[in-house]
Image (cartoon, rainbow, N blue to C red):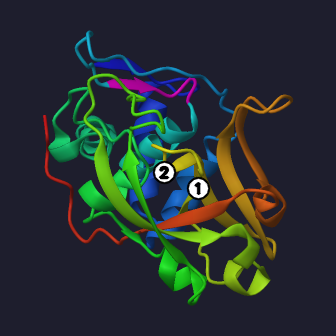
Amino acid sequence: MIFRSGRWTEDELDRLIRQTAAIRGAGERIAFISGHFLGIPYRHPTLLGDAQMPENLVIDLGGMDCFTFLDYVEAIRMSSSLADFPPALQRVRYHGGVVTYRTRNHFFTGWAVYNTGFVADVTAEVGQGKAVIVQKELNRRADGTLMLDGIESRASTFTVLPVDAFNEEIAANMRTGDYAGIYSEMEGLDVSHVGIVIRKQGSLFFRHASSAPGAGAVIDQDFLEYMNGRPGLIVLRPLDLPMKIADCR
């Protein structure tokens, strides 16, 4: 395992996780955790492992991309102390907690497939009849080649809320702590970007690790403005966790 605690000492991180564990409600817990990540630099790639190189469990809180940001937030919300964090991250990032490149969750919709005890796909519920069903072969481009070498392509069916159906009424169905994936029209991909829905001061925000010029960090942006011109949305909702996650070490 490679562990970099970023802006925190290990003792400070342990105290933060213990504070988090005392917060009731999945959404409130995620808002609290992710708020402490605001301003952390965008960095990609940070994970170690590919078709030729053995996978290593990486925890790097000093810099993250959009997906590792979600990994860390979700793993911390499952933890009661710093000792719980690495095994929880294994459960979030890898199928069955097995640390290999092949078992890594490379696609956002894989969370709803492999992490069913942690999150649920609520796109249809949020969309109120306006969502559509999409079928894709993930990891296979239109020309038949693989996007990620060493990873088998997988036929996938999932629900998408088209951007032209998105309005303030539908936005009202979204909750703080929802994980939002921006649908990609590209063959082989489910989403192009991910982040967290946050409600504050009567407004809806998209909290995400942004690589955009002038940002380059975890930031909050107005959600409806961010969605303008995007093709669609997939929404995964965190489930309450009544019991401690099993140790995967």
Left/right of residue 4 with respect to residue 168 in the rendered view: left
Q: Measuring 44% from the left and 41% from the top, which residue is drawn there?
A: 72
Residue 190, percent from left and from top: 48, 51
Residue 147, by quadrant, is top left
Residue 217, percent from left and from top: 71, 32
**Region rendered in magenta:** 58-64
Q: Is residue 27 above or below residue 106?
A: below
- Toward the top, the furthest residue is 52
The crowding category of the residue bearing disc 2, from other C-alpha atoms within 10 Å (few below 14, some 14 to 19, many at least 20), is many
Q: Measuring 57% from the left and 49% from the top, which residue is drawn there?
A: 194
Name the disc covering residue 183, or none: 1
Q: Is residue 90 above or below residue 213?
A: below
Q: Measuring 16% from the left and 46% from the top, which residue is drawn there?
A: 96
Q: In which quadrant will I find the N terminus?
A: top left
* Amino acid bearing label 1: Tyr
Asked whether residue 64 is in view, the answer is yes
Marks 2 & 1, CB-CB < 8 Å contact: yes
* Amino acid bearing label 2: Asp
Which residue is identified by label 2?
Answer: 190
**Residue nearer the viewer, 145 or 227:** 145
Q: Which comes before the other along the chain, label 2 or label 1?
A: 1
Residue 170, by quadrant, is bottom right
Question: Is residue 41 rendered magenta in the image?
Answer: no
Left/right of residue 56 with respect to residue 23 in the rendered view: left
Name the disc covering residue 41, or none: none
